[in-house]
Image (tube, grey):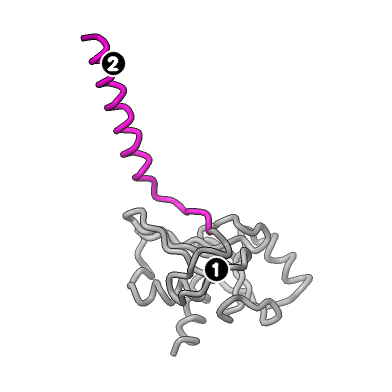
Amino acid sequence: MLKFRIKTVLLLLIIVILILSGCKAGPEPINYGHDECEFCRMQITDNRYGSEIVTDKGKVFKFDEIGCMIEYALVKNFIGDANQKFLVTDFAKPETFIDATNAFFIQNENFRSPMGSNVMGFGSEISRQKFIAESGGSLLNWVDVIELVKKRSM
């Protein structure tokens, strides 16, 4: 009888752990060279530009650049929805995701992004200013990037 109770408790514990681990809503690493952009269907290859949307349900959509992420979000009416997480790669630390709504952006035509928006995200103002000093570009915030993508898609 004791063995049965121990097995039952262990089984319930395993079930609870599996359920809780499946509810985690966060970013997933992009498998560069294998994963496909949700919007343009191109293979995601450049680790300086990858981005993701994590929905309130925990679904992760991966993109090859910020422009594709925003165009997808516009089509799906995600822009302005506080329940969705918008994540961009920190250009200064490739493969590190940062919250797009708080990121610091630059557009620089000399740094070609996969689909041509040429927008880079930075996790800090210091990183952005260092890049500007070395390479130039236009300073943008999250709303500016959305407006830029809207104009491009018209």
Q: Which mark is residue 35?
A: none
**Horizontal side, residue 95 vs residue 87: left or right:** right
Q: Quadrant of the C terminus?
A: bottom left
Q: Hey, what amino acid is under mark 1? A: Ile
Viewer-side residue, 46 vs 100: 46
Q: Is residue 132 magenta?
A: no
Q: Quadrant of the N terminus?
A: top left
User: Residue 46 placed where, x, y %?
Assistant: 62, 68
Residue receiving disc 1: 44
Q: Hey, what amino acid is under mark 2? A: Ile
Q: CA distance from mark 1 to mark 2?
A: 47 Å
Q: Which mark is residue 6?
A: 2
Q: Residue at position x 49%, y 80% from top?
A: 149
Marks 1,2: beta carbons within 8 A: no
- The correct choice, above or below, for 106 with respect to 7 in the image is below
Q: Residue at position x 43%, y 74% from top?
A: 39
**Horizontal side, residue 153 vs residue 140: left or right:** left
User: Residue 121 placed where, x, y %?
Assistant: 60, 66
Residue stretch rendered in magenta on the structure: 1-30
The chief SS type of the magenta part is: helix
- The correct choice, above or below, for 90 with respect to 3 in the image is below
Give the image quarter of residue 54. Answer: bottom left
Q: Residues within 10 Å of mark 1 (few under 14, many from 20)?
A: many
User: Residue 102 placed where, x, y %?
Assistant: 52, 61
